[in-house]
Amino acid sequence: MTGLQEAQRDQDDKLHEECGVFGIFGHPDSAALTVLGLHALQHRGQEAAGIVTFDDGHFMSERHPGLVGDIFGGRNADRVKNLKGAYAIGHNRYSTAGGSAVRNIQPMFADLIGGGLALAHNGNLTNARALREELVGEGRIFQSTSDTEVIIHLAARSLYRPIVEKLVDALKKVKGAYSLVALTSKKLIGVRDPWGVRPLVLGKLDNSYILASETCALDIIGADFVRDIEPGEVVVITKEGIESFRPFAQQPNRFCVFEYIYFSRPDSVVEGRNVYEHRKLTGAELAREAPADADMVIPVPDSSIPAAIGFANEAKLPFELGIIRNHYVGRTFIEPSDGIRNFSVKRKHNPNRATLEGKRVILVDDSIVRGTTSKKIVQMVRDAGATEVHFRVASPPTAHSCFYGVDTPNTDDLMAHKMDVEQMRRLIGADSLAFISMDGMYRAMGHAKRNAAAPQFCDACFSGAYPIELTDITGASRSSQLSFLADAAE
Amino acid sequence: MTGLQEAQRDQDDKLHEECGVFGIFGHPDSAALTVLGLHALQHRGQEAAGIVTFDDGHFMSERHPGLVGDIFGGRNADRVKNLKGAYAIGHNRYSTAGGSAVRNIQPMFADLIGGGLALAHNGNLTNARALREELVGEGRIFQSTSDTEVIIHLAARSLYRPIVEKLVDALKKVKGAYSLVALTSKKLIGVRDPWGVRPLVLGKLDNSYILASETCALDIIGADFVRDIEPGEVVVITKEGIESFRPFAQQPNRFCVFEYIYFSRPDSVVEGRNVYEHRKLTGAELAREAPADADMVIPVPDSSIPAAIGFANEAKLPFELGIIRNHYVGRTFIEPSDGIRNFSVKRKHNPNRATLEGKRVILVDDSIVRGTTSKKIVQMVRDAGATEVHFRVASPPTAHSCFYGVDTPNTDDLMAHKMDVEQMRRLIGADSLAFISMDGMYRAMGHAKRNAAAPQFCDACFSGAYPIELTDITGASRSSQLSFLADAAE
Amino acid sequence: MTGLQEAQRDQDDKLHEECGVFGIFGHPDSAALTVLGLHALQHRGQEAAGIVTFDDGHFMSERHPGLVGDIFGGRNADRVKNLKGAYAIGHNRYSTAGGSAVRNIQPMFADLIGGGLALAHNGNLTNARALREELVGEGRIFQSTSDTEVIIHLAARSLYRPIVEKLVDALKKVKGAYSLVALTSKKLIGVRDPWGVRPLVLGKLDNSYILASETCALDIIGADFVRDIEPGEVVVITKEGIESFRPFAQQPNRFCVFEYIYFSRPDSVVEGRNVYEHRKLTGAELAREAPADADMVIPVPDSSIPAAIGFANEAKLPFELGIIRNHYVGRTFIEPSDGIRNFSVKRKHNPNRATLEGKRVILVDDSIVRGTTSKKIVQMVRDAGATEVHFRVASPPTAHSCFYGVDTPNTDDLMAHKMDVEQMRRLIGADSLAFISMDGMYRAMGHAKRNAAAPQFCDACFSGAYPIELTDITGASRSSQLSFLADAAE
Amino acid sequence: MTGLQEAQRDQDDKLHEECGVFGIFGHPDSAALTVLGLHALQHRGQEAAGIVTFDDGHFMSERHPGLVGDIFGGRNADRVKNLKGAYAIGHNRYSTAGGSAVRNIQPMFADLIGGGLALAHNGNLTNARALREELVGEGRIFQSTSDTEVIIHLAARSLYRPIVEKLVDALKKVKGAYSLVALTSKKLIGVRDPWGVRPLVLGKLDNSYILASETCALDIIGADFVRDIEPGEVVVITKEGIESFRPFAQQPNRFCVFEYIYFSRPDSVVEGRNVYEHRKLTGAELAREAPADADMVIPVPDSSIPAAIGFANEAKLPFELGIIRNHYVGRTFIEPSDGIRNFSVKRKHNPNRATLEGKRVILVDDSIVRGTTSKKIVQMVRDAGATEVHFRVASPPTAHSCFYGVDTPNTDDLMAHKMDVEQMRRLIGADSLAFISMDGMYRAMGHAKRNAAAPQFCDACFSGAYPIELTDITGASRSSQLSFLADAAE
């Protein structure tokens, strides 16, 4: 985990999306447009990024740690020029423990019988360990610790032809959440898992088709949104056009509700809903469910601004920026030896005393994970003179880990896993604390309530109802530890 | 100019403060606290930063290009450990043309008769060239192209003792705007020029005094705000305590009004006014002066949010985030060869179609410099479906260059220098355009109107009324060009 | 190819060994000793180096481009500390076209059924392409373009157990030259190919066994030389001691004669002969075969000094340093636009006019490859005033490419491939030119003459008699090009 | 001190020249030729290098730590392109304690009245501290700790005109050893101090004059040697040609004898003598003075090879490379925790057992400073089987520090300062030890003997007879320590 990641985790106490993907077919500037698309998707992963293109019989790759703007901008702009060709796929990666090695940066690539396959993946497989053990048992060699390599090995082993069929054959064997883009020498392929947990959209720019995790990546290049790729759908884009297959057994849709709450950018349209507008609706629902007698509504910036606007409008209270965010975050500093109260939070947030002093404040956040940051922010706001602090959270208590592609702390570190609301209130030191109810969250989505038998979304992090089997977690197959190579400094 | 600077200049079309300063006396963690202070002042200068400390008979220095978090954080944390001692001063630098050499990074230092002097300066001298020529004429050697070195040479040449008197002697010879912090082996010194153009505040943390450009640098370390250093005041902090002198001829106060409009952080309290609250007042005044029939008020993020909130509240219109900002800006990318409409702006801003479509929009910005970005943003908002775009600016037209420490384009590049409001409206493509009036700006400050005979602030960038003589600009003394050394890569 | 490599290739016109290997078992400082061993073997490969150790259930790796002293010395010394454990193998790599990617740096590693295998290889396989196509045909995925990965895949696929048997099974399928060291969680393994083309020696330091390409790597750590590993021998070192196997069909010994001529360090003892003493004998034989009437004998420094001493002693002529070498070679410089005669050679060599002026000179070199450098050196020596230049070469004409682990130019670039001696003499501009005869070279080795039916050494680069089948070169199996991923900047 | 320097000091136990200088006037490729000249002079200083050129009204500079080939070669070749113009001076710097900051890298530059002056200096001033205190007393500001800046300040203060007269005025005030090159906007200037301690030669390439520390820098660019600059001579090169002045009081010549013994490259011609030939003569004289009954003569490589050849020829004994040097030295490694005998020496030297075993050996070195390395080498040679080791040194015992531009250990660390020859013999463990006598050294120079009243050379390091007053060393003026700024990482 890089210093930047540490710093962010330390400061924002959020769940983090692990990846963003982008692909484009048939555009002379495919690499430059992929850079822009990945830049627009930067919020989905900041540890590393990579792009693979194909031109004149060869695949070309640039995969590096860092932010897209640093990897492909400024003095590194030559890397974009190296990536020739009209087809490209790209990937933003969020860090996961032990996996920051260059060899884990996507897209991954392999030469299969019949040609090369590059693959970029957003999500997480729940039977990857079991499959990996089976593949190693056949004498197959892994170079990374990434799930994506499992899919590539399964494709390489497949007897089907052509490569797109090998990929489908591979995906039939995996379980879990995945939205992926793949590139062969002739095709751009996009796939969403049968439950449709992670997003993937189709766009068009002139005659070029585009696949991306979110619509904001279409906006930045001026492309038109065509439609969402559907759960279980495989789209294959060639010079002849676009084709669609549904090779998997159908499953109930379980789109990740957290994409609305925090992951997606507010300007994205996700499965038909604008994220910003949705967050305002959630804030309003929260205001109805859990009003408070106060002088103003204040967001924990920046992600909670829409929910706070919605809350303030509904509550007919002023919306104020009572906490100012420093956008130059950077790496962790040395902590002064005699300590500074709320040191780590202050690098990013400062309360505005002139606005807060003597006021009763409603603090709106989109979610709470560990509660450590919330506690510091409540204290900061009190220190700045607020007389009352009412904390409102625009999502239900996060009580369960995610195994579908989101970086979650261990269950034991989730504040809501071990405490009830009153305990949590005391922990964070607020005068009152309320989360939106599960049904309230669904109401803000336009549903009357959560359908307990077949929930309209994947809400496992709130409900513990995991739609896709967790083979590696629950299975007895966990055999001997593999003797992984630890590349200390690669 | 670094890629980051280029990118920002390209995208935000703002005036930029050239520096932030910080000093602390008598704290065992002086360097670590200075790092935090500079981090809080990062918005005042992003090109470079430096810190000088004194300990055990020696001054120590770390001066590097980059952001504070990169220079002193993460793997560079050892630099902080190298900076031993209980006294420190630090400086953030904004780039100016041709001056990015390491030797121009502040604080500057020299051995004088009687001991060392380190100096960090926010502002700009208006007779620096004339003084420099005089000093070179005496066989004195310059190592940088910085104004600050002129002050140091004048102090070195001075026959007064001790060093603080040398510094005062030097400052009596310079003209221009300066808020500076200086360090000797025994003293921390703070000075504001007699007009008080640039800010400087005094704070206290336990038994340590602190000097800083803005109060947000006190907040981050938990220090208390004591008071503003007054125009023309010299404060000298020693182990014995703090003393104050007024060695300069008194001048009318002319604090920079742009500190309120854009430079200072919204959570800072500047000369007794909270910046955030002031910006809301300005937005409200603007709403009264120049209302528009519209459906919503939208800020050009992020700096214009307070003015937009003030405008929306006054106008009783919804405040909405109609433009989403991407905070991962980074370096300039390669532009796709066939172009993307509004390419450079889109890296930072994306309009939210769901919010804007079919709506009449009031767009609030705090200032316009060249107008190039405004034009792109208006077009972006229209492309996203807005039916009307009414542009409102929370400052008067910027028609004159600043010579007091702000990075301004040439006068000819200032949109307001050559156009009237209707011409500007047509240039940026808005349905209507209004700037707050000069008197409106003063009213938001709590004055009845601008005092034309003795304006309450320095408003030269709007009015052209320069309070301090511009010797180097207007003087006939501009003799032969010096044969400056161009350190291509130092 | 790095700048350093370019510079060297440009200047020295030598064949280059592609690798050096080192392994140690059972020493608490295994990584530090491997660093020293690789440093002593630096002449065998300067592009990159890597070390793998095993400790506490995990393999650890550090593989980087550059010289050993830069990779593991000075500020990078922490890398050595990261490499914990009592077993280690290491590798120095010489660049080959297109293969400078980090993923090609050895030792390579894979998790096999039963545990991990790390492998470092000196040599070249002659059926690697054919095997690679077969393995890809089975759906196996390659990550590098290195021969070594072919061996690892063959081992991974093998059904034998334990891992050492998998490795032997793999090696039974490969053709070519290889001296390799391998590490499992319990064993250090050393193997030489059945013809014994490349060297590998066994040493001992206290209770630790060592494997190394040359004895100079034993000397640097104060280890004792035990014996050469024999052609076709597999040694397996465990806590229980050392065992030896001979699993391959026996072949006639064909040790690379060029190891004596140029590759090995003069202080190494190679297959029972000290290299320095052998080179002197060769120089003496050359003096007997091709004397010249001259005033002094001058080596082309540094590698030809021993042969020149031997020649001078035999010819009873003074040995003089008439050409001075600049050891600070570094990267290629910009050539002045109006040119400097013999520019590229002069960066490394300068003739000593005071010694050469008016003298008849015998210039001794150990080998000539392209002839370009020889031509420049002859001209340099003439320019410095030599009246006659007699060029003597301590090896026969290099007329054929090597396919057994040596970086050779294309056959067409070998001066001796297309010219007879008189043509070559005219090309390089010498007054006379002589190469040692093939039989003379064998006489210096202590043989009466070359045994044409079964040559005592591999002398293919002189004779064209390749002892090991060149499957990939001559075979018809060269099917379609694989779509290798070109990692431009990894 | 860099790792490279540490490593070298650790291993070679030699005195080290502190600098090399180069200048060229009137050549379109002046920067590229200066790079080559500095490369040829790399042995005189390896810590840093810099070049200043003048073109079109501006001076340009590139000054960086590292080797010339790294600073200006390979991917840094653009730096050469930045250095436009037909005039250039350059400098190689050897490290001295505390002085590795970038601001100490030469050439130094200042704007004086009348134009710029760039200066590069080989030597050391003996009254620099006294002058510096005087200049600081006048309020002048120093940016470096270098002697060179003292000269520049004196020139800047001078009332003479033009700049060349200012420089002469300055030099009249300094004491010590200096050979320097200077550049103004119109002139290239070369000066040697009145005693002529350090070398400086004049060369010509087409119509361009060149100044350089040694003739090897002329050879590399194909320039002709014209003559030595004479002691006390000032040469001024302009478009009109070359002029010569002798502004200083005449002094007896005292050229540094150590330039012959070790500093200069063997292919240089220094004050009329070829260094290589001279070293052979010294070796022969040593053989006559101190013969030994032995089987062979072995140099401590590489610098002692010429002396050993001279010794062997005179003694009619075989010359052999009994110690092999590893030229890939690089940075210091981690020492294995349980130690390796003669670890630090073995990184650079390995004895050749096959040559040494059972032999009586004469080991020839050019000089001994501390004796630590000699001891290790004697032991190494014994360990390799030599039955007797007779150590012969081609210079007298080094018993006194140098204050004229050579990096010498403290007097107490000089082996010869505190021991007689027998004590030294026991320390280094040789069977016999002999140094050439003082008169023997002068005989090898062609003198009958040393003229004690007026020695023909500066031999202060052997004799303690310092020709130039040591003001800073012996004077009582050493007042308070200046408060130098320690730029930890600049």
Image: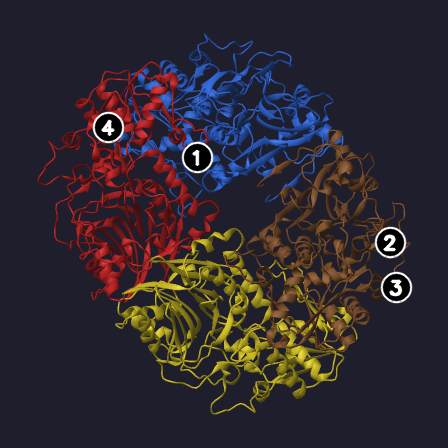
Chain colours: A yellow, B brown, C red, D blue
- What kind of residue is marked 2? Asn
Q: Are marks 3 and 4 on the same chain?
A: no
Measure the alpha-carbon separation of dots 3 and 1.
77 Å
> Which of label 2 and label 3 is nearer to you?
3
Marks 2 and 1 close (CB-CB < 8 Å):
no
Measure the alpha-carbon separation of dots 3 and 4.
96 Å
Question: Which of the chains bears the disc numbered 1?
Answer: D
Disc 4 target residue: C424
Picture disc at residue C360:
none
Question: Which of the chains bears the disc numbered 3?
Answer: B
Question: Which of the chains bears the disc numbered 4?
Answer: C
Q: Is residue C93 above or below residue C359?
A: below
Q: From where the camera sits, is residue D396 visible?
A: no
Q: Secondary structure at mark 3?
A: loop
Residue appearing at x 24%, y 39% in the figure: C412
Q: Local crowd at mark 2 within 10 Å, few (<14), some, or many (≥20)?
A: many
Q: Secondary structure at mark 1?
A: helix
- What kind of residue is marked 1? Gln
Q: Is residue D48 shown left or right of residue D330?
A: right
> Which of label 3 and label 1 is nearer to you?
3
Q: Is residue C211 shown left or right of residue A408?
A: left
Disc 2 target residue: B253
Disc 1 target residue: D11
Marks 4 and 2 close (CB-CB < 8 Å):
no
Picture disc at residue B447:
3
- What kind of residue is marked 3? His
- Place of residue A240 in the rendered image (x, y in percent of width and height, measured from the top left): 37, 70
> Which of label 2 and label 1 is nearer to you?
2
Marks 3 and 4 close (CB-CB < 8 Å):
no
Residue with the most extreme top position: D448
Q: Is residue C36 above or below residue D422?
A: below
Q: Are marks 2 and 3 on the same chain?
A: yes
